[in-house]
Amino acid sequence: MAGTLLVRGMLIGIVAGLLCFSFLKVVGEPQVDRAIAFETQLDEAKARAEAQALIAKGLPAPQEEPEPELVSRRVQAGIGLFIGVIIYNVAFGGLFALAFALAYGRMGDFGPRTTAALLAALGFVAVYVVPNLKYPANPPSVGDPATIGMRTALYFSMIAISLAAMIAAGMLRLRLVAGHGPWNAFLIAAGAYLIVVIVVSVALPPVNEVPAEFPAVVLWRFRIASAGAQLITWTTIGLLFGALAERVLARPPGVVRYSGTGGPSGAGRYGEGSAERPQAPLV
């Protein structure tokens, strides 16, 4: 069962990847081009200033040869972007399927579609929204190359803590439902999650390496493109996977489908009833 869901999750990842590629090609890539142009202008201005300083001291200005371009910008924005986005979304779809298999039947009295939608919504908040409020996305040309390791570690640490806090909040809600009711249990769990991520966000060091002269419009549009691509991924996988999972889980394993009237009572029309009925955990 989990293997079947995994395959469907990866197939849906292809659909999400195609949608994301189309969106990023139209909305995101122009902002990357503008950011690269800005970086090039800064590098050229810095080189001119260094050359003028050497000339003022009576020294010859260095003649720098342009570095060979290993991968052209056209390839990066075309086939490179396409392959990267497709691979990312296929892997993401597979991981989502595995997470669904673990969460189904454990999140509450929800069917496949509701479980997938809730899982996608909560995952989008925990994995993207909260970490990006602390460490927002920046164009590739923004930031000090010497600190990329530190920035990456901080960002993934925020993701891990936010995701762990979300899982813990979900477990807390299930424990509190019986004594406090669904709504109060949700509010308490949500408050506990917010407290954890706010404390962690304040404790972690800030990172702000965007140059003061960097165009604010380009930065804003790039972050909008980043958020839009993530929203497309989570929404597409959450909705489509729920629909396919509902079909996979509609027939319990081992049930024989009869035709005509020769089978047991009601067996000739298997699948009747609500597809949103609660199911036992898959794993």
Image: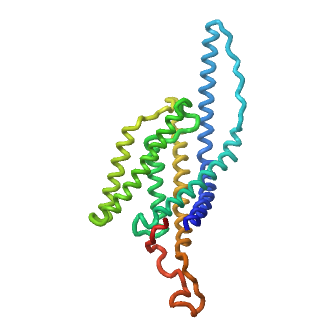
Task: Determine the residue positioned at 54% across, 34% down.
Answer: 148
Q: Is residue 276 above or below residue 60?
A: below
Q: Is residue 45 above or below residue 258?
A: above
Would you say 54 lies left or right of 186 here? right
Residue 253 percent location from the top left of the image: 54, 75
Q: Is residue 1 visible?
A: yes
Which coloring applies here?
A: rainbow
Q: Is residue 214 visible?
A: no
Query: Disc count in the image?
Result: 0
Q: Residue furthest left?
A: 179
Residue 86 percent location from the top left of the image: 63, 53
Q: Is residue 44 above or below residue 193?
A: above
Q: Residue furthest top?
A: 58
Would you say 265 lies left or right of 25 here? left
Task: Determine the residue positioned at 27% across, 63% down.
Answer: 180
Residue 63 percent location from the top left of the image: 70, 18
Residue 196 percent location from the top left of the image: 35, 47
Front position in the image: 283 or 246: 283
Quarter of the image that includes the N terminus: bottom right
Task: Determine the residue positioned at 65% across, 46% down.
Answer: 81
Front position in the image: 72 or 42: 72
Would you say 270 lies left or right of 86 here? left
Task: Determine the residue positioned at 55% across, 55% down.
Answer: 233
